[in-house]
Amino acid sequence: MSDPQTPGAPPPGETAEPPFHQAEQEETARAETGGADDPLNGQITAAVAAVEAAIEDAMAVAAASLAQVVAQSAGLAMLNAVNAQQNAYITANATVAATVARILSAREVVTKEPADV
């Protein structure tokens, strides 16, 4: 006795494809034929391709600009570090010079007498 076939079921030996897969295949076929059934499809496809190309070009320019900005920032950070180090040396030298000048300008030499023990 053979099994009766369920309505809508594929014939024995074949598998059923979900409906979205069929729509995807139709869309692919339409794209491959250039949308012969719709005159606007080619124009839409061309417009989308032009926008995508413009975006890709803009992304390339943005990436190059970002690299330049990072290099500029790194260079400025190194310049600031060198400047801070030079300012620290200037301050240290000024402190030593002021201290030596104060020592040399002392008029009275103070000596401590040894304390009586």
Image (spheres, rainbow, N blue to C red):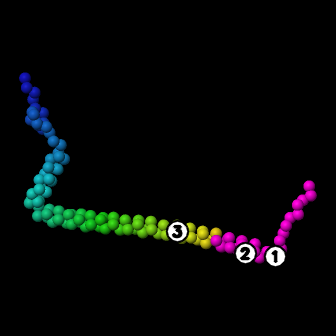
Assess disc 3: are there few (<14), some (14-19) or many (≥20) residues with their C-alpha within 10 Å of its C-alpha.
few
Instruction: Identify which residue is drawn at 48% across, 67% down.
Output: 78
Where does the N terminus fall, quadrant-wise?
top left
- N-term-proximal mark, 3 vs 2: 3
For the view shown, which residue lies furthest in the left direction? 1
Question: Distance between the Cα atoms at labels 3 and 2?
Answer: 29 Å
Residue type pointed to by label 1? Arg
In the image, residue 16 sits, relative to residue 64, either above or below, namely above
Q: Give the left or right position of residue 32, taking residue 105 as reference.
A: left
Residue type pointed to by label 3? Val
**Residue 82, position as x, y percentages in the image:** 52, 68
Tell me the number on the disc at residue 101. Answer: 2
**Residue 105, position as x, y percentages in the image:** 77, 76
- N-term-proximal mark, 2 vs 1: 2
Instruction: Identify which residue is drawn at 61% across, 72% down.
Output: 90
Question: Distance between the Cα atoms at labels 2 and 1?
Answer: 12 Å
- What span is in magenta? 93-117
Circle 1 residue: 107
Circle 3 residue: 82
Assess disc 1: are there few (<14), some (14-19) or many (≥20) residues with their C-alpha within 10 Å of its C-alpha.
few
